[in-house]
Amino acid sequence: MALFSLLVVLILERLKLVGGLLQFETVFERYRRATFDDSALRSPWKLALVLLAPALLVAWLADLLQGVHLGLWHLLLWLVVGVVLFGNQSLRQRFKQYLEAACRGDLQACFLNADKVDPVPFEATDEAQLGQRMGQVAAWLNYRYYAATALYFVLLGPAAATFYCTVRGYHDHSLRQQLHRPVLTGLMTLMDWIPSRIVAFGFALTGHFSRALSVWLALVFKPAVSARELIYRVAVVAEEIPQESEAPVCVQSTLALLKLAKRNVTLLLLVVSILTILGWIN
């Protein structure tokens, strides 16, 4: 169930067969506007309610549909939830705009589009720094929107994945709006702690193993090391950046680390397949 659902939703997302109404950002924004506004979410109770409600609904439906019509409705629920959670075409489009600006040599447009990709402000000052930072961001976003979501989806089910994505949505919204939400920051840190270490180890396995493993071992057991910092530092040393490339400087690191992230997702699917065959994952 988990492996089949994951493969189907990733194929649908990759082929852009999912309409805009089922994209995560669209669904999340409708949900956010239909519930409490930003000022109301200063209340811990209201914040807990909006974070838990979607996951509880999915868990209730999963329990209700278990075994109905040979499990077809249960499978359909997994597919629909997966399609929404992995539907990130708007993010892909913003990243594509950055790459297109780099290819036509418009550095100013590169900086403008880079700010749209990641809610954390950029600190790059030149083309080379922008390229390295966007490469790190590519690895981070691949982790945050695909790998981490996939881990929660296959290991803990669609309800847990829904909770993770809901927290991620509100966390990123608070960063963009410069809201002070320490509860969201702490919860996001907690939920990213283990998945980020698993994915960073995958970077070592699919990249320069000895070099990346030494960095991973130096950081993995330090509670103060954030998921973003771990992904950034391991990804950079795990992948060789081509020195003689025809690509613009500001996309060389980006393209290299995108390849690393894609190999890591392939490794994740392979591991899930093996665990499914062994019966460790349903």
Image (cartoon, helix red, strand yellow):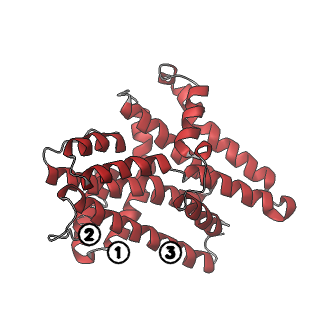
> Where's the C terminus, which quadrant?
bottom right
Answer yes or no: do the residues labelled 1 and 2 have beta carbons within 8 Å?
A: yes
Q: Is residue 190 above or below residue 265?
A: above
Q: Which mark is residue 66?
A: none
Residue with the mark numbered 1: 206
Q: Is residue 156 above or below residue 84?
A: below
Instruction: Please name whichever residue, 14 or 196, is drawn nearer the observer in this view of the structure.
Output: 14
Q: Name which of mark 1 and mark 2 comes first in the sequence.
A: 1
Residue 55, quarter of picture: top right
Question: What residue is at 31 percent from the left and 54 percent from the top?
Answer: 99
Residue 133, position in %: x, y?
23, 52
> Where's the N terminus, which quadrant?
bottom right
Cα separation between marks 2 and 3: 20 Å
Q: Which mark is residue 271?
A: 3
Q: Is residue 198 left or right of residue 71?
A: left
Q: Name which of mark 2 and mark 3 comes first in the sequence.
A: 2
* Mark 1 neighbour class, 10 Å CA radius: few under 14, some 14 to 19, many 20 or more: many
Residue 21, position in %: x, y?
61, 42
